Image (cartoon, grey):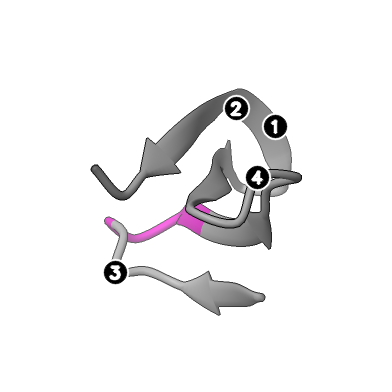
Amino acid sequence: ISSPASAPPGYDILISTVPHQEEDKQEITVKVSRDGHHLFELTTIKADW
């Protein structure tokens, strides 16, 4: 699942959520680009405790 997020003009933020192998976890990736150029990507695991 991907969804757009609010970003300053010229920037694009894409957030992707993928179910993890373990049922209670999700892998979340945030990709940021500016004027079509990739700036950085952050991936983290969200766990329901």
Q: Earlier in the sequence, mark 4 or mark 3?
A: 3
Residue located 48% across and 53% down the image: 24
Question: Which label belongs to residue 38?
Answer: 1
Is disc 4 in contact with disc 3, using a CB cutoff of under 8 Å? Answer: no
Is disc 1 in contact with disc 4, using a CB cutoff of under 8 Å? Answer: no
Is disc 1 in contact with disc 3, using a CB cutoff of under 8 Å? Answer: no
- Which residue is under mark 4? 22
Q: Which label lies toward us, 2 or 3?
A: 2
Q: Is residue 22 left or right of residue 44?
A: right
Give how far apart the Cα atoms at labels 4 and 3 are.
30 Å
10 relative to 4, above or below: above
Dot 3 amino acid type: Ser
Q: Nearer the viewer, residue 4 or 20?
A: 20
Instruction: State yes or no: residue 3 in magenta.
Output: no
The secondary structure type at the circle numbered 2 is strand
Counting from the top left corner in percent of width and height, residue 44 is at 48, 29
Task: Give the position of the C terminus as an image quadrant.
Answer: top left
Counting from the top left corner in percent of width and height, residue 18 is at 68, 58
Dot 1 amino acid type: His
Q: Earlier in the sequence, mark 1 or mark 3?
A: 3
Task: Name the image quarter holding residue 16.
Answer: bottom right
Q: Which residues are magenta?
A: 8-13
